[in-house]
């Protein structure tokens, strides 16, 4: 049953986002720095691999470097997951009005709709997060924090700068979320059917546990990452801070694609992939464990009150 539970989905999603960011942020910093380092004129140090990057950042910048951009990441993830699960459950409710059960196509449509709406709402937060993560002690005129970054961007670049990377971000949110949630829902449905032996009927959620949610979350995330990762690289490169003269490194998504393909080949579109997998596979497990369990607790509390 979905009707009447949209706010529970939002709360559960926000709790999941909070847990995820707190657990994985240093790997997010490493991933972002790998993504924008094209080996040419980057002001980001060159790292050999993910462990080397973590060690180098910790030694040169301390804990603050490993958690650069943590506030916007925390804000963005909490709000994004809350909105995502809310919009996703609303879309599923709308589609369920005329049918007994949703198939892969409608799960895909629900997730795509939610991803697009979330991206429009949160792109400025992700842009600030990216820029804070790319700051190094040697950088001229660094942002002092989230609010200073917002003020400086608006003053120097205008409000449109807050939506840099929106196009690849939309493609990323729509396709990534759609693939992930479709895979998750189908794995979840399949496991519930196997355990109960009722393949044609909708079944109560108590046949699954946290281990199941962790496995489904990790597998669905890996599938989404492999298919959509280049969009993340394109978005990160577009969201870099312009040089001192105010000239952006890349003009638009097509420019990123052309330059990356020309100088780096296919490998350039998968820079930071290792850190991304290390971050997101367990993070997705944590997200869905927290989400499903918080949602079940909220449903139980609602039933007791009714």
Image: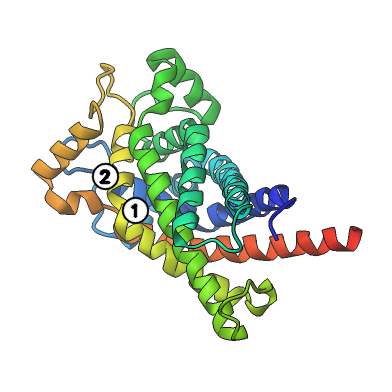
Q: Could you say which quadrant of the image residue 80 lies in?
A: top right
Identify the residue shown where x is 14% and y is 37%: 259
Identify the residue shown where x is 72% and y is 65%: 296
Q: Is residue 85 left or right of residue 206?
A: left
Whole-percent x, y for residue 17 in the image = 58, 52
Give the labeled residue for mark 1.
56
Identify the residue shown where x is 19% and y is 43%: 38
User: Marks 2 and 1, how far apart in space?
Assistant: 9 Å
Disc on res. 198: none
Disc 2 to disc 1: CB gap under 8 Å? yes
Q: Nearer the viewer, residue 298 or 284?
A: 298
Q: Nearer the viewer, residue 260 or 223?
A: 223
For label 1, count other residues whose C-alpha is less than 10 Å away and answer few (under 14), some (14-19) or many (20+): some
- Residue 298: tell me if it is visible: yes
Q: Is residue 249 left or right of residue 33?
A: left
Rendered-image quadrant of the N terminus: bottom right
| Label 1 element class | helix
Q: Could you say which quadrant of the image residue 262 lies in?
A: top left
Identify the residue shown where x is 45% and y is 54%: 108
Q: Quick one: label 2 or label 1, which is nearer the N terminus?
A: 2
Give the labeled residue for mark 2.
45
Whole-percent x, y for residue 6 in the image = 69, 49
Whole-percent x, y for residue 14 in the image = 63, 49
For label 2, count other residues whose C-alpha is less than 10 Å away and answer few (under 14), some (14-19) or many (20+): some
Q: Nearer the viewer, residue 138 or 133?
A: 133
């Amino acid at each position: 049953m979905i009707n009447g539970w949209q706010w529970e989905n939002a709360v559960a999603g926000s709790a999941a986002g909070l847990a995820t960011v707190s657990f994985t942020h240093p790997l997010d910093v490493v991933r972002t720095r790998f993504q924008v380092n094209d080996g040419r004129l980057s002001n980001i140090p060159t790292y050999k691999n993910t462990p080397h990057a973590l060690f180098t950042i910790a030694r040169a910048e301390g804990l603050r470097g490993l958690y650069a951009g943590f506030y916007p990441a925390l804000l963005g993830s909490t709000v994004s997951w809350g909105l995502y699960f809310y919009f996703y459950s609303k879309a599923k409710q709308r589609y369920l009005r005329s049918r007994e059960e949703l198939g892969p196509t409608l799960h895909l449509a629900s997730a795509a709709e939610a991803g697009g709406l979330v991206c429009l709402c949160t792109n400025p937060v992700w842009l600030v997060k990216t820029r804070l993560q790319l700051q190094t002690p040697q950088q001229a005129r660094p942002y002092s924090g989230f609010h200073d970054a917002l003020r400086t961007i608006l003053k120097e670049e205008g409000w449109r700068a807050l939506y840099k990377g929106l196009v690849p971000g939309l493609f990323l949110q729509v396709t990534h979320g759609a693939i992930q949630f479709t895979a998750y829902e189908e794995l979840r449905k399949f496991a519930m059917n196997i355990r109960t032996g009722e393949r044609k009927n909708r079944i109560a959620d108590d046949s699954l546990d946290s281990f199941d949610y962790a496995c489904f979350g990790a597998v669905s995330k890996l599938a989404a990452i492999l298919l959509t990762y280049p969009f993340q690289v394109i978005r990160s490169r577009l969201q870099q801070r312009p040089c001192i003269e105010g000239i952006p490194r890349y003009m638009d998504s097509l420019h990123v694609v052309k330059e990356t393909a020309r100088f780096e080949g296919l490998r350039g579109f998968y820079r930071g992939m290792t850190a991304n997998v290390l971050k997101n596979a367990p993070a997705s497990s944590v997200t869905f464990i927290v989400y499903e369990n918080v949602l079940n607790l909220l449903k139980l509390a609602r039933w007791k009150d009714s």
